[in-house]
Image (spheres, helix red, strand yellow):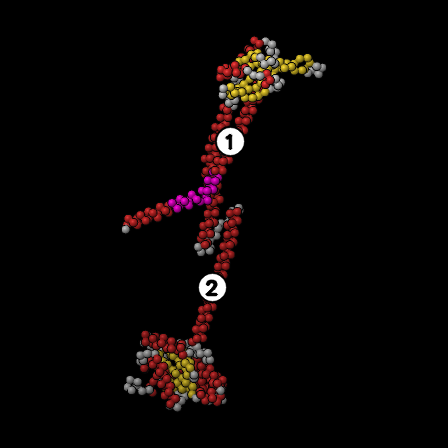
Amino acid sequence: MSNQQETSYDTINHVSWVRRVGDVVTSLQVKSTTLVVFLCITVVGASSSFLVRASAVALRQQQDESLIGLSSLLADAAAPLIASTKDVQALAQRAADGSPLVYVVFHDTQGRVLGSAFHGMAADHATVIKARHIEDMALGRPILWQQKNDHLVFREVVYPINTSLDSNEFGTGTKTLIGYVRTAIPPNTYRLTLASSMDVLTGVGIIALVFSIPLGFLLVRRIAWPLQTLATTMLQFSQGELHVRSPEGRRDEIGQLARAFNRMADQHQHAHEGVLRLNAELEQRVLERTEQLRDLASRDPLTGLYNRRHLGEALRQAFEEAQRYDRNLACIMIDLDDFKDVNDLQGHRVGDQVLVLAAETIKSQLRSSDLPARPGGDEFVILLPQTSAYRAATLARRIISAFCARVEAEIPEVSIGMSAGISDVETLKPAVPEILIDEADRALYQAKADGKQRVCTPDHLPDPLST
């Protein structure tokens, strides 16, 4: 089992490591850095290639211009010597020795060779080099081309040799073509200079490549880091941390995005707080409404006293507390005397007025801990915690007296009174709370039997155990 767990942990760690590597490789920072380095390599490569080509063209043009200039000097030097083959040969030999020229050949206007000199690899091809059609040379101007002889390439110039005759009255003379001079150099002489330039460019490219990687990384990090910070902030915000905000120090598009997100976050937070406040208000209203409905369901709509259902619940609770803490609990049951006659003679409206007056009188005489109720009809029940039967009887007499006084003062045309029955836990020692109500009801009937408008206590009742 342990080996299986270790294998499972190793697999999870391996997958986690592979996932982290994959996240790093596919991250925007790595992709952007690779793109920047690729662009740097592309730009450096393209620039180097362009510079090499441009340098090659410039060096070749410089070489051609040098070759044409040297040919011009040889043509000017050979013009006075063109009639002497020996002198022309000596000039050709001196020109070819110790110079970059691989050969020098002088021709007359008919194409015959007047003098020539060769050195290096060109000496092996002297016969081929001397052969040149007169049509190729009789153009009267310098000609520059490449001559290939058995894979040996030479950069050659054919330059005309002119002489000046009869000057006119303006001091200018007429040039007459008297021959040609052919000079050549290897075409790769400029490549030594180009090779050194290539070394410099290669070094610059390597340095640029070496510096492009960290610079590209730093540049991309400057762009990607704020995006990563913004993404982290958005993730925290989506997970419920509504107070988080993204830094707004940047003035570019990322800063605009951060400011837009912060404004959205502020609006969302304000809306969320408004919803929370509204929910709190609605919950409070629901609680209040629920309490109102519960109160309406537990009260008598006419008198405002508690109804029979709530009386039963309150009686059980008060009875349990009395037994638990060894305290007394008294119960008063009140009934209006001759209430049916009031309804029959005065009407139900007056009857309701009497009931309301009775309820108000009862409530005015009670403590806050006492519980008055109207189980129905003209009966009223009062629960008195921590009260004896004697004190309950005193309270009942006071209620009856106050009620009669108010009826006489407010409804003089009505003749009505109250009777009350008393019971308490200490006297009865009841096993169930309902006995307390039953004994108070029995005491009430006894009070009515004794002549009404009386208060009857358990002392007047026979002992229920002896009957």
The residue shown at (46%, 80%) is 302
Q: Is residue 38 above or below residue 156?
A: below
Q: Amino acid at mark 2?
A: Asn
For the C terminus, the quadrant is: bottom left
What is the CA distance from the residue labelled 1 to the residue labelled 2? 72 Å
Q: Amino acid at mark 1?
A: Ser
Q: Position of residue 307 (x, y in %)?
A: 42, 78
Near mark 1 (Cα within 10 A), the count class, few <14, some 14-19 or many ≥20, is: some
Q: Is residue 205 above or below residue 363?
A: above
Horizontally, residue 33 falls left or right of residue 83, namely left
Q: Judge whether residue 330 can be spotted in this image.
A: yes
- The answer to whether residue 300 is magenta is no
Q: Position of residue 335 (x, y in %)?
A: 41, 85
Please tell me which residue lies in front, 199 or 103. Answer: 103
Q: Are marks 1 and 2 in contact (CB under 8 Å)?
A: no
- The answer to whether residue 21 is magenta is yes
Instruction: Please tell me the numbered disc located at residue 49.
Output: 1
Residue with the mark numbered 2: 279
The secondary element bearing badge 1 is classed as helix
Please tell me which residue lies in front, 419 or 394. Answer: 419
The numbered mark, 1 or 2, whose residue comes first in the sequence reads 1
Q: Is residue 255 above or below residue 350?
A: above
The secondary element bearing badge 2 is classed as helix
Magenta-highlighted residues? 18-37
Near mark 2 (Cα within 10 A), the count class, few <14, some 14-19 or many ≥20, is: few
Q: Position of residue 295 (x, y in %)?
A: 44, 74
Decide whether the magenta segment is chiefly helix, strand or loop.
Answer: helix
The residue shown at (50%, 16%) is 125
Q: Nearer the viewer, mark 1 or mark 2?
A: 1
Q: Position of residue 390 (x, y in %)?
A: 36, 83
Please tell me which residue lies in front, 123 or 5. Answer: 123
Horizontally, residue 149 falls left or right of residue 465, namely right
